[in-house]
Amino acid sequence: MTGGSGTGQVAVIGAGMHPWGKWGKPFVAYAVAAAKAALGDAGVDWSDVDFIAGGETVRNGYGGYVAGSTIARSLGWNGARVATCYAACASGSAAVEAARTRILAGLSNVALVIGADTTPKGFLAPNAGDRWDDPDWLRFRLIGATNPAYFGLYARRRIDLYGASPADFAAVKVKNSKHGLHNPFARYRKEVAAEDVMASPVVADPLRLLDICATSDGAAAVVLASAEFANRLGVRDSVRIRAVSTVTPTFPNTIVDLPDIATDSAASVAPPAIGYRESIAAAAYEESGIGPEDLSLAEVYDLSTALELDWYEDIGLCARGEGEKLLHEGVTSIGGRVPVNPSGGLACFGEAVPAQAIAQVCEVTWQLRGQAGDRQVANAKVGLTINQGLFGHGSCVILSR
């Protein structure tokens, strides 16, 4: 699949981050640092930005502080149009889509897309109180399914269907830790051996502590612009957004996701041709005219090591059940055919929910520009980012140079 219908009229002209970790600062402090880095990278002033889209900052797994106007105020009111987006882990992609759509509509020339967060200690959990109409609250209270439990269920499914093993899962962590060694924005920059993973405490069988990503503070920002604005700046051969996919599932969703704990209805309604997670990338491939065979790299959502293997198949790098083979052959390592998570992924960053989808776009942008240093993917031309937000939010961005 080549060429395609993507307009390619929106350019990524700036990218910036605040290093991820546990810093104990307000989320706005991280946001301002990332914004200034992205604006400096783009070579534009804050006063030139006519639209700002902020990923809403999370509190205990739920939308917390309004981000767009809060960050705009800290940068200095400039009269820009503003939006705040909450889609849990897909918040960053939703913000990218809001800015991209506004630019494509001719309503904006240059936009700042930003996400930043501080996270509570330990795993994300719901707020206190009864929320009987909230599926996320229900999955905690009715079946006790924390996020690690969800990750563990998916890992167990992979073992049952494809014969995967905890050693396979550990190999994902080993790979990503090697990649993250060379990323100055990563929280964990230490090479991890398979033995370390296998010796860490069990959290949600079969997953151990080092199979599951931590929570982190952090921020990421990108500056998007129309082709005309990029040309006026003298930006040549810019990275372009070819597609953004934010699709919902199609009824019936035959693989039950949490917090969607209702049973599927495939007994009475024919299931869709492809499942939900596959449909996220499929929609972006269709929009861009780019296929998995064209990818130079991918940033996927390794909330757990086992989930990364699922994403290999969901984005079409291999057939079902072949993720482990792809991993062990080195295809998804830097130097392989399609490196996955050259940034180190969430294994090395941890979760800063509103920022992570934007951080993925930052990494692909640097890779396509050839600015990724010792983690650079050779001759990178096309990159994909993908994750999944709560409540049926898809999240995929395809970029090319």
Image: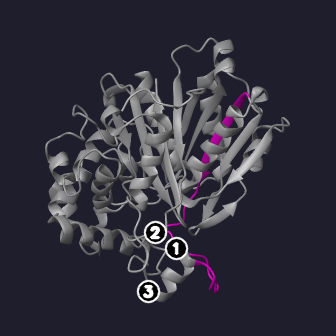
Disc 1/disc 3 C-alpha distance (Å): 14 Å
Element class at badge 3: helix
Query: Disc 2 vs disc 1: which is toward the camera?
Result: 1
Q: Badges 2 and 1: C-beta atoms under 8 Å apart? A: yes
Q: Position of residue 307 (x, y in %)?
A: 32, 59
Q: Which residue is mark 3?
A: 143
Picture residue at 56% right of the left edge, 75% below the top:
126
Q: Is residue 263 left or right of residue 196?
A: right
Residue 41 x %, y %: 58, 24
Query: How many marks do you count on the picture?
Result: 3
The magenta span reads 109-134
Q: Residue 315, percent across and down?
A: 35, 48
Q: Secondary structure at mark 1?
A: loop
- Residue corresponding to mark 2: 122
Residue 6 appears at what percent x and percent y? 53, 31
Residue 123 shown in magenta: yes
Q: Mark 1 and 3 residues: CB-CB less than 8 Å, in contact? A: no
Q: Is residue 40 above or below residue 34?
A: above
Q: Amino acid at mark 2?
A: Gly
- Give the residue type at disc 3: Ile
Residue holding disc 1: 125
Q: Which one is closest to the eye, mark 3 or mark 2? A: 3
- Residue 82, image quadrant: top right
3 or 2: tag closer to the N-terminus: 2
How far apart are labels 3 and 2 at the CA level? 20 Å
Task: Answer whether residue 136 is visible to the viewer in this image.
Answer: yes
Quarter of the view holding residue 145: bottom left
